[in-house]
Image (cartoon, rainbow, N blue to C red):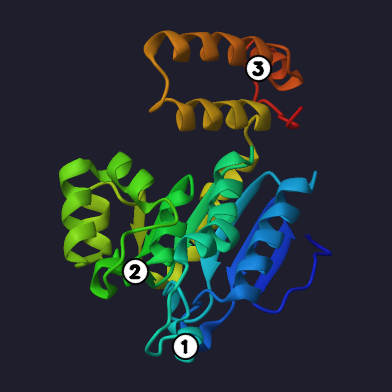
Amino acid sequence: MATAAPTYETVQFEVAEHIATITLNRPDVFNAFNDQFSKELLGALKDAERSADVRVVILTGAGKAFSSGQDLGDLKKKYVPGHVPHLGDDLRRRYDPIVKKICEMDKPVIAAVNGVAAGAGCSLALACDMRIASESATFIEVFINVGLIPDSASTFFLPRLVGLGRAMELCCTGRKVDAEEALRIGLVNQVVPAGELMTAAQAMASRLASLPGRGIALTKQLLRKSFENSLDSQLVAEAFAQETAGMTADHYEGVVAFIEKRKPSFTGK
């Protein structure tokens, strides 16, 4: 059953069967980022992180788009002769906390990409732990088309997913990547027909929610750190994490269930 959840204007937040679904809800502007949207998305992620009932998060968009990135309509009054933008401050205040929250929370976050993911919207999808795309989804590192660099951690995640050469191409040309190519180059985990997107995302989320939550959290932390750690550092981190996982009730249940030849019943403890 769905449980009571906080009410927002620019995002929808629903919890059911241990899965929090956060829907970006500015479909009239293709779920573009403005100040309110940024604050509410971060708030929804924090709510999902704090909730003991939530084990997995799905992030998706309402309407035809996942997110088109920055709401350029907000810039019309600013971009006049003499305007000096301070975009670094804007990133630190609005976008970076969202990316960090997705990465730092123990719970896995699945992006269900229902349409265009452009600019910061593309970065948002890349920051998630897994991506399931509809056949109509597209990914665009559009920043170069307005004389900017990919931000909101696109330069961090994209080369890790598709390699340095491919990332350089996509970032410096700003060309569109369709769902089929995204799957081929490792940008997404799965592509499904548009009408089956949320079913597929829910199925993946349900699978993850049924597994040992602490083990998944520790695995997420290890994988996130693996690109920065040396081999020795990663081995030390694995040993510490394994010691921690070995003390959980879910580990005991998993071993006993295997011995007794039955399906384990994990509780996330």
Is residue 102 shown above or below 21? above
Residue identified by numbered label 2:
137
Which residue is depicted at the point 51% across and 89% down? 28
Where residue 263 sits: x, y (%)?
64, 26
Q: Distance between the residues labelled 3 and 1?
A: 48 Å
What is the CA distance from the residue labelled 2 to the residue labelled 1? 23 Å
Judge from the rendering whether residue 192 lies leftward or rightward of residue 234; answer left or right: left
SS class of the residue under badge 3?
Answer: helix
The earlier-in-sequence mark between 2 and 3 is 2
Q: What element carries label 2?
A: loop
Q: Which of marks 3 and 1 is in front?
A: 1
- In this figure, which residue is indicated by the disc labeled 3? 245
Give the residue type that dot 1 points to.
Gly
| Chain-order first, disc 3 or disc 1 | 1
Q: Residue furthest front?
A: 82
Q: In which quarter of the image is residue 10?
A: bottom right
